[in-house]
Image (cartoon, rainbow, N blue to C red):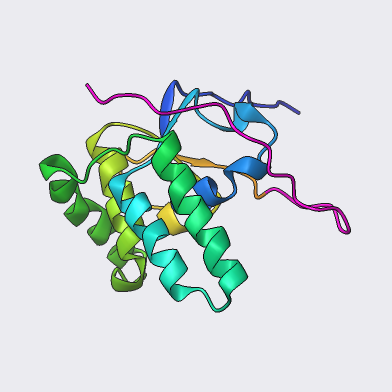
Amino acid sequence: MTTRARVRHERGVLDTSTLILLTQIDDESLLPEEPLITTVTLAELSAGPLLAKTDEERAARQSHVQQAEADFDPLPLDVAAARAIDRVALALRKGGRSVRPRAYDVMIAATALANGLPLYTCNPKDFTGIDGLAVVPVPVPVPVPGLPVPSKPKPQRKRSQK
């Protein structure tokens, strides 16, 4: 039996699910050397506190927003990304999936495509069948029952855009 070595990209876009679970991912080799997020990811996170059902959940979601703002300089949804949206939407429709409920995913994928970057996600099925998009599955961290989820700090990842 042969095993394939996992390729670690220099740069890659984290989708929202991966960003939310980032502090729980212990194996840094599962992520790009320079993780990036998009302005769309930041927008999706920003909507989170408004949808929370409890004050505790609202505070946790607001903390994710503030941490992302502090740690990342997001890639914009620029003209090239806007033009890539049609390719992503078409791929989803061909796969029998609706585009509307996946609007954030469509824009995140289009931004990754427009920048020629792979997309790291804990939900790879959300992005299958999109031509030209390299999707890198990130295993969902499994918490140990009875133990609190660690909230270890991650190294600063903010980089200026060139």
Q: Decide whether residue 157 is among the magenta residues.
A: yes
Which quadrant is the C terminus positioned in? top left
Residue 95 position within the rendered picture, expressed as x and y whole percent measured from the top left: 36, 64
Which quadrant is the N terminus positioned in? top right
Residue at (33%, 60%) from the top-left corner?
104
Vertical placement of 100 versus 149: above or below? below
In front here: 50 or 137? 50
Vertical placement of 116 versus 94: above or below? above
On the picture, is 149 further left or further right than 51? right
Name the image quarter holding residue 55.
bottom right
Find the residue positioned furthest to the bottom. Answer: 53
In front here: 102 or 132? 102
On the picture, is 41 further left or further right than 146? left
Name the image quarter holding residue 29.
top right
Residue 94 makes an appearance in the image: yes
Magenta span: helix, strand or loop, mainly? loop
Q: Decide whether residue 152 is among the magenta residues.
A: yes
Please give the range of residues in magenta: 141-162
Name the image quarter holding residue 113.
top left
Number of numbered discs: 0
Residue 130 makes an appearance in the image: no
Vertical placement of 41 versus 57: above or below? above
In front here: 157 or 119? 157
Vertical placement of 91 versus 1: above or below? below
Residue 34 position within the rendered picture, expressed as x and y whole percent measured from the top left: 45, 25
Residue 59 position within the rendered picture, expressed as x and y whole percent measured from the top left: 55, 63
In front here: 2 or 160? 160
Residue at (25%, 26%) from the top-left corner?
161
Residue 79 position within the rendered picture, expressed as x and y whole percent measured from the top left: 10, 43
